[in-house]
Image (cartoon, rainbow, N blue to C red):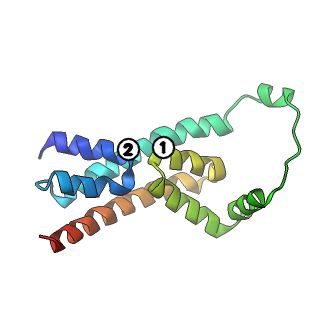
Amino acid sequence: MNWLAFLYVFLWSHVKFLVAATIAIATYPKLTVDEIFVASALGAISCFNIFYFISYKFYFKRGDKKNSKKKKKSKNFKKRNRILIKMKQSKIGFILVCTLAPLFLSIPIGTVVVVKFFGHKKITYLYVSVLLVIMSFLLAYLNDSIFQLFE
C-alpha cells in the first residue's frame, strides 16, 4: 500500500469529492479500487464531520443575546425566495439538497448549504454520512470499470 497515494486521494476527496476517484485512478494506477474507495470515503466523512459541526454551531448554537438586540426585518419575497422556501418545505427538496450539494459543490460548501437548510432535522447527519460512503463506493467502482474499457 502506497501511503502517499492514499493521503493524496484522502485530501482530494476533501477538495473535490466527485473527481477524487477519477484523479486517483489516472495518477496512481497501482492503487486498488478498494484502497481508492476507503481513502475517498474517509476523506469525505472527515471533511463532512468537521464542517458539519462547525456550521451547525454557527447556525444553531449562537447566543440569544445577539438575536434579542436586533430588530427583525421583513422579508422581501421574490421569485427566488419562494422557490427556495418551496424546496425547503418539500420532502424531495431535502433529498435533492442533501444528495447533490456535497457532490457537485465541494464537501465543505455543500455541508454548509445542507446545514443551513436542513440542520434542524436530526436525520440529516446520518443521511449525508451514509450517502457519502455509498457515493464513494459507486464512484470508485464506476471509474475503475470505465478506465478498464480504455485499456
Marks 1 and 2 in Cβ contact (< 8 Å): yes
Q: Nearer the viewer, residue 111 or 128?
A: 111
**Where is residue 96 shown, x and y percent of the image?**
56, 65
Image side of residue 151 versus residue 15, left or right: left
Quadrant of the drawing holding the C terminus: bottom left
Image side of residue 148 versus residue 84, left or right: left
- Residue density around tag 2, few if under 14, some if 14–19, many if 20 or more, within 10 Å: many
Up/down of 23 relative to 65, above or below: below
Q: Residue at x 78, y 61 (%)?
A: 79
- Direction bottom: furthest residue: 149
Secondary element type, mark 1: helix
Q: Residue at x 28, y 69 (%)?
A: 142
Give residue 21's mark: none
Q: Residue at x 39, y 42 (%)?
A: 46
Q: Residue at x 54, y 58 (%)?
A: 98
Residue 36 seen in render: yes
Tag 1: residue type? Pro
Secondary element type, mark 2: helix
| Sequence-earlier tag: 1 or 2 | 2
For residue 14, which quarter of the picture? top left
Up/down of 106 relative to 56, above or below: below
Give residue 14's mark: 2
Tag 2: residue type? His
Residue denoted by label 1: 108
